[in-house]
Structures are given as C-alpha cells and as structure tokens.
C-alpha cells in the first residue's frame, strides 16, 4: 500500500527548507524503491517544528516528524520511514496528540495543514462546503440572523458584530452590492490570515459566498498584501478552480445567484488595513482614510453597500452555518463568543498559531503553549494586538483574552497577535518605535496623526535625554490625548496606546540614562 507523506508548502515552512525536504524525501524514496505519495499542505501552525513531515497509510492517524532537515531524510528511511512508528529522535507520535495541537479548539483552522489546499475533493472530504450548502436552503435574513446569534464579531480589531453588518448591507438600497475581504495582514506578530490563504483557501471562498447569499452581493474583492506571494499564487489557483467547479461565477452551486471574486494586491501601505483606506485603494486611488459617515455598509466600494470583513471573520462563517449558531456560541465567555486564532511571536520558545475559545489567559498562551521565552530569560512585557497594541507587564498575564477584559486592562485584542519580550527589552525604545511607526505609515490626511507622531518621537527623545523631563512628559500626555481624540482613524488614534502603556508600566526605562550617569 502506498504511504502518503504530507509536507507543508506554507511560507513559514518554505523559509526553513520545506521544498528541499520534499525533494530529499522523493529522491530517497526513489533510490530505495519505496512507493509513496507526497502531498504538499498548509502548515499546522506549530512553527518551531517546521518543516513538519507527516505520514499516514490509508485512513490511519497521521504521525509527525520534525523539524526535519534534508540531511535527516536518509536516517529517517533507515529507521523505517515512511512507517508511522519509525524509530527516530524526530518522531513525535500521532500529530493530533501533540499537546500544542491537542489542547486547541480548532473550528476555523480544523483543515489547515490537513488538506491539499488546491483540492476541492479534499476540502469536501473534510467537511468543506457544508456551510454554503446550508445557506442555500435559507433566506438572506435567516443567514444574517444565524451569524448574529452565533456572536461572531469582526476579527480584525474593532470587534463589530458580523451579522449586524451583513444585515445592514442586506437592507441597504442600491445595487450592485459587494463583499470586500481585508487580507492586508500587516500587524507585527500576525500570520493567521496567511496560514488560511495558503493552507485552506476554499474556506475563504466559501465564507465570502455565504456573505454574498446573505446580502445579495454579486461581486467580491480580496485585498491581499503584496508581501504574501505564496498566498497570492495559492489564491489565484483556488479562485480559478472554484469558478471551473461552479463554486463561483454564474449560478453558484446550482443556485440562481451570481458571485465572482477578484483578487487585488496592496502596495505595502499599513494604513490600508483600515477599511475605508482599503476601499480607496481598491478604487485605484491613494490609500487614505475616509471620513465617516457614511459607513461602508451604506456607501462603500464605488459608493455601493459593502460588507468589509477580514479573513478570519469570513472564514468563521462556514462553521456557523454548517453546525449552527449555538455550536459556535457555546465557546467563549460573555460577549466574546466563539474561538480566536492567537498568534505567538517575538521572544517565544514555541511560536505558532493557537486557536482557542475566548477567555483563555495570556499566561496560558505564553507559558503553557509557548513555553516561555526562547532566550530562557524572564518575560518582561507582552504586546497584544499589533504595533498599536498596549504593552502589558507580567502581572497582567492572567487577564482573560476577551474583547472586554483586555479593554478593561487598557489593551486590545486586535487581530490576536501576541509578541513576547524578555527582561532585556528597552521599553522607552519600544514607545519611541510606536510613534516612529505611525510617522512612517500615516496616510497623511489628518494633522494629529501626520504631525503628532513626528512630534511624539522628538518628545520621547527629549525625555530620555533628560531635557525638561517632567514638562516633556506632560507634553507627551497632552499630545497622546490630541492624537486619540482628533485622528480620523485608528492609525493615529491608537498609537498613544503602546506609548502610554510603556510610560505607565515601565517608567524606569525612561530614566535609564540618568541612572547610568
């Protein structure tokens, strides 16, 4: 019987030699006359184990080996590979039993790393398509209500209820209507969108089709960051296959509905992660934020009603429709319902993706899943929610990871990125970085963001240099207030969050030069 060998072609795995490992396995199998079928998958998200190689015979559970280098391959074959019980130090046992994966609740990422990303047959065999099939039996209002009842909220940062947004577009006058997927994943420490797009692209296509059925939209756009070439290639191929198979185009899935998806690439602007700046870019203009109202749900792309959701929001919808709103809402706590894909990055021993119900603590994510710092030194600070997120000290690690609890702690969930720093970090430098990042990435439309961020860098430099420290600290607080209250979008409005959190929790770092003198 031919064994199946699964090797990721996800960008993270490719960056550490997955292609070379796949070639080495094929060459070694041919040399030994071993029959096997190599399947290139997405990543499971256990990034410290990449390249992770899995083997299975027929329907047997997969067994994992990793991290595998090309030079390990001959020794693996000597030990019995591709037999699942090959006796080698890289053998990890059944993949699903690895604690990092076993202890997750994978709803959105259930297929990621398990299927051939460009096989609709594989997608269907693992439950794909059930959500849109269910949606086709429902009215648009019923679809919107199911998404509302599930508690699904936007996974891009604001956390607005997805069902309410969809229903607003459904009821809005005007045609055509659009679904715009924000795949401009630019936050530091985040990679969940990329993993889905490279490992399970038909899930996004299905989610967008469900949104189209709910709202009456006939066209969709995926706005993908240009720095994701592997995701671009996979998406292009998946969109072509979906149209050939009747999942997109005229009469999708045999219905009377027409829905097409267009892929568009960004141009490296961080601010285009903001929904209205993204719409401006999609329309061929410079990516600058729009004043609101009107909201995109009323006047969005080309002035028409538009659903703007990010990848993770749209990819959660198929589970909601396939299994019911109650099944999704059963996870999480309070108003933070369902699961959130958390991404562990920075100075972390076991970096990767963890999908878990809302309510898990930051300490559990960092210590139990992440294994603490890679350096072995104590954790000193954690930034949650990207470069505009707050820096939290270790005494805040027991805060539950929910929209409400993090907001109460002066932080935000954002896209679920968690960046860990050990005790060697200079938090004054990190505060300066936040202001400098804003100065570089600002679209320039509003004065508080454009000028305030530049002045912020200068003021922090004066504080650290001991120049009128108290007066400049008061000036910095005033500047942060103006940026928060006066900026048109979250770029300038949230930049003060990491700055003020660094000042509040790590004031000693702004006096280090004085101590050294």
Image (cartoon, rainbow, N blue to C red):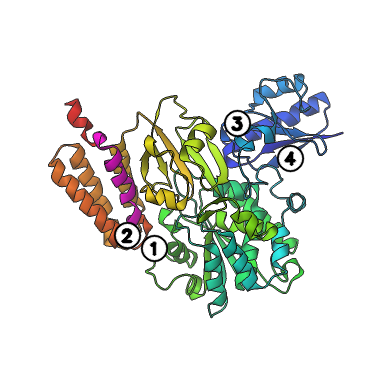
Callouts 2 and 1 close, C-beta under 8 Å? yes
Dot 1 crowding, Cα within 10 Å, few <14, some 14–19, many 20+: many
For residue 236, say whether it is visible: no
Magenta residues (range): 492-509
Q: Which residue is mark 2?
A: 444
* Front of the two marks 3 and 4: 3
**Residue named by callout 3:** 49
Q: Position of residue 150 (x, y in %)?
A: 59, 60
For the C terminus, the quadrant is top left
Q: Is residue 498 magenta?
A: yes
Tag 1 or tag 2, which sits nearer the N-term? 1
Query: How many residues crowd around disc 2 within 10 Å: few (fewer than 14), some, or many (20 or more)?
Result: some
Q: How many marks?
A: 4
Do the residues under discs 2 and 4 have CB atoms within 8 angstroms?
no
Which residue is outermost to the right? 1
Q: Nearer the viewer, residue 422 or 197?
A: 422
Tell me the residue that label 1 is attached to: 288
Contact check, label 1 and label 4, Cβ < 8 Å: no
């Amino acid at each position: 019987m031919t064994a199946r060998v699964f090797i990721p072609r996800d960008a993270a795995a490719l960056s550490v030699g997955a292609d070379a490992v796949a070639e080495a396995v094929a060459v070694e199998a041919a040399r030994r006359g071993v029959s096997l079928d190599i399947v290139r998958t997405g990543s499971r998200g256990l990034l410290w184990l990449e390249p992770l190689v899995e083997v299975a015979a027929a329907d047997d559970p997969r067994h994992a080996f990793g991290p595998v280098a090309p030079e390990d391959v001959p020794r693996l074959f000597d030990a019995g590979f591709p037999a699942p019980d090959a006796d080698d130090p890289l053998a990890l046992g059944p993949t699903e039993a690895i604690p990092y994966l076993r202890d997750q609740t994978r709803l959105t990422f259930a297929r990621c790393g398990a299927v051939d990303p460009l096989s609709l047959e594989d997608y269907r065999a693992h439950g794909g398509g059930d959500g849109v099939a269910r949606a086709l039996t429902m009215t648009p209002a019923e679809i919107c209500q199911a998404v509302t009842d599930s508690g699904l909220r936007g996974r891009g940062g604001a956390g607005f209820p997805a069902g309410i947004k969809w229903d607003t577009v459904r009821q809005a006058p005007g045609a055509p209507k659009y679904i715009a997927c924000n795949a401009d994943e630019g936050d530091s420490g985040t990679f969940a969108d990329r993993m889905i797009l490279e490992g399970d692209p038909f899930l996004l296509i299905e989610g967008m089709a469900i949104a189209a059925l709910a709202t009456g939209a006939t066209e969709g756009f995926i706005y993908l960051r240009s720095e994701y070439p592997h995701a671009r290639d996979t998406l292009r191929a998946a969109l072509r296959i979906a149209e050939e198979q009747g999942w997109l185009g005229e009469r999708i899935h045999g219905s009377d509905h027409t829905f097409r998806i267009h892929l568009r690439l960004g141009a490296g602007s961080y601010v285009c992660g903001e929904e209205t700046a993204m719409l401006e870019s999609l329309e061929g203009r410079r990516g600058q934020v729009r004043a609101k109202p009107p909201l995109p749900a009323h006047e969005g792309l080309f002035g028409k009603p538009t659903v703007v959701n990010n990848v993770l929001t749209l990819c959660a919808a198929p589970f909601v429709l396939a299994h019911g709103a109650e099944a999704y809402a059963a996870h999480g706590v309070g108003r933070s319902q369902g699961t959130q894909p958390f991404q562990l990055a920075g100075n972390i021993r076991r970096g990767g993706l963890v999908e878990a119900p809302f309510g898990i603590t930051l300490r559990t994510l960092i210590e139990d899943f992440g294994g603490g710092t890679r350096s072995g030194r104590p954790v000193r600070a954690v930034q949650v929610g990207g470069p505009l997120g707050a820096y939290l000290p270790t005494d805040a690690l027991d805060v539950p990871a929910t929209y409400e609890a993090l907001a109460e702690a002066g932080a935000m969930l954002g896209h679920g990125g968690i960046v860990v720093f050990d005790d060697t970090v200079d938090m004054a430098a990190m505060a300066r970085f936040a202001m400098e990042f804003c100065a570089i990435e600002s679209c320039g439309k509003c004065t508080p963001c454009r000028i305030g961020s530049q002045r912020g860098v200068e003021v922090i430099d004066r504080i650290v240099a001991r120049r009128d420290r108290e007066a400049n600290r008061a000036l910095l607080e005033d500047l942060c207030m103006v940026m928060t209250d006066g900026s048109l979008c979250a770029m300038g409005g949230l930049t003060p969050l990491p700055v003020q959190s660094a000042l509040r929790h790590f004031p000693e770092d702004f006096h280090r030069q004085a101590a050294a003198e």
